[in-house]
Image (tube, rainbow, N blue to C red):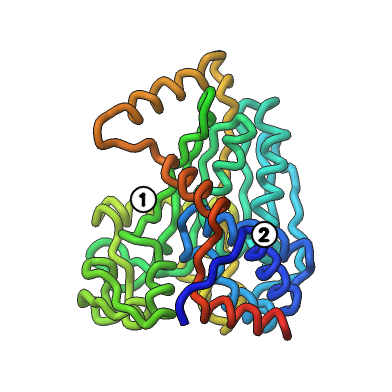
Amino acid sequence: MGERLLSAEEAHRLCVAALVASRTAANNAEAVARALVGAELAGQGGHGLRRVPAYAAQARAGKVDGFATASATLTRPGAVQIDAAYGFAYPALELAVARLVEIAPAQGVALAGIRRSHHAGVAGLTVEALAEKGLVALLFANAPAAMAPWGGRRPLYGTDPIAFACPVEGGAPVVIDVSLSKVARGKIMAARQKGEPIAEGWALDSAGNPTTDAKAALAGTMVPLGDAKGTALALMVELLAAGLTGANYAYEQTSFFDAEGAPPGTGQLVIAIDPAAFGAAGAVARFAEMSQIVGETDGARVPGQRRHEIRYRLQRDGIPLDSALVHEIETIAAG
């Protein structure tokens, strides 16, 4: 059916309409739409509108509570516990950002632990939002089990993103966003939806053999980034995002891709740091110095720079989306 070009505003309205038609409160639908359109504008379509059909099905089934209200409890002067209440992650992440912006400048460092959560989407968007408020930020998020410990076959870890961002004097923030699998699992979901093969080396089937079949890959395990180092980092994220916050570990979670079973109950840990915490008033200028040197190196690119270029182009020209996907979301929105 080809592609359809939607403006960011049209894509946002379509997301909201589909979710509101699927047992989701308007304010929660708005937060989800901001995140999904933000993912598209960051060039991360696997975390974008392709998620709407699954999200809508989960909200209708009660696997995610579309009417949940995230709540925040200050447990220490610099620590806030966020309960996503088995709703979408995005309202909880927005609440975490708002509270950390209040707390971190006074404390020097603050952290938000989120539990009973859901798919965190593009982790870089959350840390970027904090960097735009002048804070250094880190995010650790877990996800349903998709990777085995190095040398094993049983999936115990999610693809578990790690994200970092810092403000840069006179420029856009540096944004680092990495999945601990070789590629994000959303890319495999997108390939399955399109009926396309995946690249060799991305995933293993359920028997532990390399596969280029997207369906077999989703039933198997993801290949970790950096081999054993990637699974060690995934363990670290599981301990920070779930062990520390009280959320479910990856192996205790249900899938993000279907409406079966109980809520996944994921966890996220967000850390915000005042750049002047150590008395270095010029820290943001120093960040700019390092960023400039990287950017001026032949063949190099500052992490986050590409997403700014993509965002500008897509906001100007529109977001290209599969026509079949747009039609499916329109059908959901129509009830």
Q: How many marks?
A: 2
- Residue depicted at 57% across the width and 76% down the height: 326
Q: Amino acid at mark 1?
A: Leu
Extreme residue toward the front, this view = 317
Neighbourhood count class around disc 1 (C-alpha, 10 Å): few under 14, some 14–19, many 20 upward: some
Question: In the rendered image, which quarter is residue 7 located in?
Answer: bottom right
**Residue 261 in sight from this viewpoint:** no
Q: In the rendered view, does 79 fall on the left or right side of 142?
A: right
Query: Is residue 205 placed above or below 266 in the rendered structure?
Result: below
Question: In the rendered image, which quarter is residue 14 located in?
Answer: bottom right
Q: Amino acid at mark 2?
A: Glu
**Residue 141 in sight from this viewpoint:** yes
Mark 1 / mark 2, whichever is N-terminal? 2
- Residue depicted at 52% across the width and 22% down the height: 284
Q: Position of residue 205 (x, y in %)?
A: 28, 79
- Residue depicted at 67% across the width and 27% down the height: 105
Q: Position of residue 306 (x, y in %)?
A: 42, 45
Numbered disc in front, either 1 or 2 = 2
Question: In the rendered image, which quarter is residue 5 located in?
Answer: bottom right
Q: Secondary structure at mark 2?
A: helix
Q: Which residue is mark 2?
A: 9
Q: Nearer the viewer, residue 286 or 274?
A: 286
Query: Is residue 202 placed above or below 92 in the rendered structure?
Result: below
- Residue depicted at 45% across the width and 19% down the height: 286
Q: In the rendered view, does 331 fall on the left or right side of 161?
A: right
Q: Position of residue 26 (x, y in %)?
A: 79, 66
